[in-house]
Image (spheres, rainbow, N blue to C red):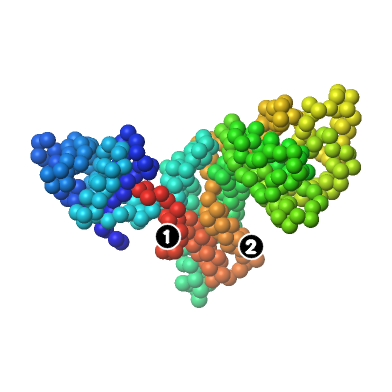
Amino acid sequence: MDQSVICAISTPPGSGGIAVIRLSGKGSIEIAEKVFTTPSGKKLSDCAPNTVHFGEISNGEQTIDEVLVSLFRAPHSYTGEDTVEITCHGSIYIQQQILQLLIDKGARSALPGEFTQRAFLNGKMDLSQAEAVADLIASTSAGQHRLALSQMRGGFSNELIRLRTQLLDFTSLIELELDFTEEDVEFADRSHLKSLATHIERVIEKLANSFSVGNAIKNGIPVAIIGETNAGKSTLLNLLVGEERAIVSDIHGTTRDVIEDTINISGITFRFIDTAGIRETTDTIESMGIERTFQKLDQATIVLWVIDLTTPATEIESLAQQIMPRSEDKHLMLVFNKSDLLSPEELKDKQQLLNNIPAPRIYISAKQQINTESLQQQLLQAAALPDLTPNDTIVTNIRHYEALTHALTAIRRVSEGLSTSLSGDFLSQDLRECLHHLGQITGQISDDEILGNIFANFCIGK
């Protein structure tokens, strides 16, 4: 493993009150003390670990800044290596001067995620915990923060460790039998193994099924806003996100591409997708936008069909023939807009529209902001996310989900093989395949390409 000293600015880019510059690797303390002096003249290498020291960073006779230096010694640090963190004033000039000085003294610039990668390689955390660090940094809602923190603390890892322990015991019994094939000895009670395989299958299946909830919390619940041109879709998007994200005009076909934005409602992130209005058109660009409308409808979990109440009923019913077949597995909501333009009698007549569609309906005026709070409440009901406790293990990472589905396929073959008295050779192969896929999640089985892809998405300095 590369043990060179790496350095990076760990605080966000730009100027601020303070900034933190991190050094890690064998020799980081010696490099830091080449540029840092305390008022007493005591060297960092003579200081106790887990201590903070005041002093100056200097380049020869030139003082760059007064700083605080935090000292950590291996293995009791984030990376598991000797680590120094320099807290300086947040001037961009000061940050760059200190960073360049450290590089001149023998450190090198850290790659994205290299500090966390070293923590993984030094056994300070497994791969799923390392990925949770990036999720924690990127969290923007209480739900995202809670899941990332739970995973970083090892909630998911502990579940996988228990599964792998059971599988290893299972595998060792089967493979022990293979060593005594000529004696026809059976070390493992097949009914017990069948019960164990069924238990493992249920746990893996539960983890894999939790991904739909975890993905919604992590990335936001996709909500497609669809309907005819000029139904008020863009006005509704702007109202929901609280800013002018989409152009609003009386001209038909203004929105020709997909516009996305997210908002947080009661701790749940929704990803709203404004789409091109659906209508017959000869405009090539608009036609491409309408095609994307249907693509986003297919990808959405919740569909808000915005219906202009001033539109003739025949047109609305005709549009229903295009929308309904694509919305059968979605949470479809009928949002009747421009209700303020109708008299009470006209509104009562319009309320008979689309009575044959079993979907919740709401009457609003996006322009006048009438009944939009009720729309938000209906969105929360449609999201239907379960109440989670700190003990719940929820999968949020697509890589973990794919590995779990492969492991589930393998353990199901084991269960089937036990039911049909399959040879131990084949059982052992399927068990090892299941172990392999679970090991990929935590990094017990990994390759450089997977590690490179994971840590490349980290910010520099973490």
| Residue at the extreme left of the image, as rendered | 41
Q: Amino acid under label 1? A: Gly
| Residue at the extreme bottom of the image, as rendered | 182
Is residue 146 in view from this perspective? yes
Q: CA distance from mark 1 to mark 2?
A: 37 Å
Instruction: Label 2: state its secondary structure.
Output: helix
Please tell me which of labels 1 and 2 falls first in the chain.
2
With 210 as the anchor, is 40 left or right in this view? left
With 279 as the anchor, is 63 left or right in this view? left
Depicted 275 relative to depicted 182: above or below: above
The foreground one among 392 and 76 is: 76
| Residue at the extreme top of the image, as rendered | 344
Q: Amino acid under label 2? A: Glu
Residue under label 2: 416
The foreground one among 287 and 76 is: 287
Q: Residues within 10 Å of mark 1 (few under 14, many from 20)?
A: some
Instruction: Label 1: state its secondary structure.
Output: helix
The foreground one among 453 and 249 is: 249
Q: Residue at image x 54%, y 58%?
A: 403
With 359 as the anchor, is 200 left or right in this view? left
Residue under label 1: 452
Question: Which image quarter: residue 349?
Answer: top right
Q: Residue at image x 19%, y 54%?
A: 105
Q: Residue at image x 26%, y 42%?
A: 94
